[in-house]
Image: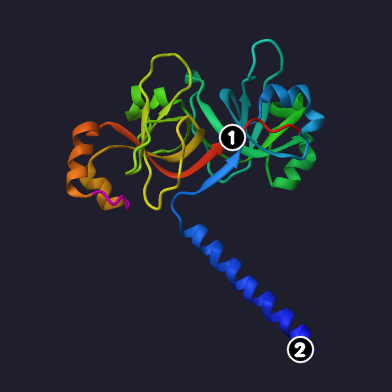
């Protein structure tokens, strides 16, 4: 009997420890997740390898269908097809296809069967809009967010201020006080995007490819110190103000470190 009680006590202690650790993770304003992006071209070429799997996709939206449908561009010019994504989240995504906006989608792949998908996800879909995609692979978008390139934010920040964003780029010029830059990884000559990471800060490395979730704001140090836990003393505030004042800055609340593409 004492052995059973001892095991129960050990399990209870372990549960308390796990709960405490989980609470600490939830409280942290900046977390790191390791993940990879999947290619639309791979999904459409090898749908059987993706059906039922959760994934992360980042692509241009080239067409809007009804209130829920997005047609994502293929990744590669020489093969693969476009793919339909159905937004089942509660947040509508307002995009203008004239700008071919990029979105980041977290979801899973299914074969489109309109009747079962409408029932399973409590959707009302117009048959005439979606019947041409029947039995084709579809991404069920559980979460999606605007994901423009860093260059888009530095060139036209006013279009993105105050919106939740997820920006992909390569880390450069890491500063110990929580400022770094995101490079677009392409030789277009665009200006790098400045990112501020509030405390507690996570360790990052130069040239890592990441996706940074956050909100874009013009940098005013007094406002940033008021709104975020940054730990900048007065001299550091003055230095940052001189270098970055009123520049568009992405304030990070989540960072995903991208691994190499997963093999299915």
Left or right for 84, reference 225: right
Question: Which span is picked out in magenta?
Answer: 228-232
Label drawn at residue 33? none
Is residue 167 covered in magenta?
no
Label drawn at residue 67? 1
**Whether residue 98 is visible:** yes
User: Measured from the top left, where is residue 105 in percent x and y?
Assistant: 59, 35
* Residue found at the far bottom of this picture: 1
Residue picked out by circle 2: 2
Prevailing secondary structure of the magenta residues: loop
What's the residue at 48%, 17% (across, down)? Answer: 186
Which corner quadrant holds the N terminus? Answer: bottom right
**Whether residue 135 is visible:** no
Using the numbered discs, state the Cα–Cα distance from disc 2 to disc 1 in whole angstroms: 61 Å
What's the residue at 52%, 46% (across, down)? Answer: 32
Local crowd size for mark 2, using a 10 Å CA cut-off: few (<14), some (14–19), many (≥20): few
């Amino acid at each position: 009997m004492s052995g059973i009680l001892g095991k129960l006590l050990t399990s209870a202690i372990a549960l308390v420890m796990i709960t405490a650790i989980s609470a600490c993770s939830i409280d942290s304003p900046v977390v790191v997740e390791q993940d990879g992006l999947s290619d639309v071209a791979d999904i459409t070429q090898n749908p059987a390898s993706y059906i039922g799997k959760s994934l992360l996709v980042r692509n241009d939206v080239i067409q809007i269908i009804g209130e829920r449908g997005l047609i994502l561009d293929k990744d590669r010019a020489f093969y693969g097809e476009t793919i339909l994504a159905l937004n089942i989240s509660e947040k509508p995504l307002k995009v203008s296809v004239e700008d071919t906006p990029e979105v980041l989608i977290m979801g899973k792949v299914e074969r489109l069967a309109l009747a079962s998908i409408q029932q399973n996800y409590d959707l009302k879909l117009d048959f005439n809009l979606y019947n041409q995609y029947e039995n084709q692979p579809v991404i069920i978008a559980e979460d999606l967010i605007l994901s423009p390139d860093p260059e888009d934010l530095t060139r036209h920040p006013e279009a993105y201020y105050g919106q939740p964003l997820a920006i992909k780029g390569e880390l450069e010029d890491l500063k110990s006080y929580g400022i770094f830059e995101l490079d677009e990884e392409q030789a277009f000559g665009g200006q790098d995007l400045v990112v501020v990471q509030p405390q507690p800060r996570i360790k990052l490395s130069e040239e890592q490819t990441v996706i940074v979730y956050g909100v874009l704001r013009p940098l005013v140090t007094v406002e940033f110190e008021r709104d975020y836990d940054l730990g900048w003393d007065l001299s550091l505030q003055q230095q940052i103000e001189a270098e970055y004042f009123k520049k568009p800055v992405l304030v990070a609340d989540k960072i995903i470190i991208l691994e190499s593409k997963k093999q299915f």
